[in-house]
Amino acid sequence: MSSQITALVSGRQTQGKLVIFEQTMVPNGGVPLHINHREDESFHLLEGTYLFEVSGVVNELGPGSHVFVPRGTPHRFQYVGEKPGKMLIICQPAGIELAFDELASIPAPIEPDKFATVCQKYGIEVLGPPLPGR
């Protein structure tokens, strides 16, 4: 398991305007390079150290940091702390939770092609691998 994601506020609660998640990541957990075509994403880091790449620029960030990724922007992140890390993710509009639900229903490990196919159904274009671990 590279992460556990829990919806704190659902799209149903906000009439589809936004969804808020809490994500816990294990060391070296991360997501592949991708573009969200339907939603803007905001990440607020609560615990641990992350590498975030947005439009080709990589920054190392810790608790209290905030990253805004407008829709259509290539991005990925990797958790590089030694203990599990935690962040809040806010997506506007809601809908991405359907992709997370479908991905969670697939037994791990998910093959990269299957991952990309599910993501594509929800307007997420996978462009490349995750950031390399340290």
Image: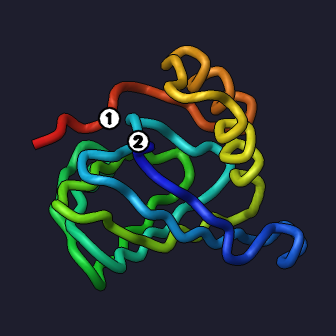
Drawn side of residue 25 relative to residue 89, left or right: left
Give how far across and how far down residue 6 sits, in percent. Answer: 62, 65
Residue drawn at (26%, 80%) of the image: 63
Q: Picture coordinates of residue 113 (x, y %)? A: 55, 14
Q: What residue is rendered at 57% in x and 24% in y?
A: 116
Q: From the image, which quarter does the C terminus lie in?
A: top left
Residue visible at 77% across and 54% down?
95
Q: Earlier in the sequence, mark 2 or mark 1?
A: 2
Q: Which residue corresponds to the image point at 68% horizontal and 68% vertical from the top-left?
A: 7
| Residue furthest out toward the left | 134
Question: Where does label 1 land, which residue?
Answer: 130
Label 1 near label 2: C-beta < 8 Å? yes
In terms of secondary structure, where does tag 1 sit? loop
Question: Label 2 sits on what residue type?
Answer: Val
Give the number of the disc on residue 16.
none
Dot 1 amino acid type: Pro
Classify mark 1: residues with Cα within 10 Å, few (<14), some (14-19) or many (20+). Answer: some
The quarter of the rendered structure image containing the N terminus is top left
Q: Which residue is mark 2?
A: 31
Residue 106 lies, with reference to residue 97, above or below; the image says: above
- Is residue 11 rendered to the left or right of residue 119? right
Q: Is residue 85 left or right of residue 121?
A: left
Where residue 30 appears, x then y in whole percent?
35, 45
Front-most of residues 16 and 3? 3
Gap between marks 2 and 1 measured at Cα: 5 Å
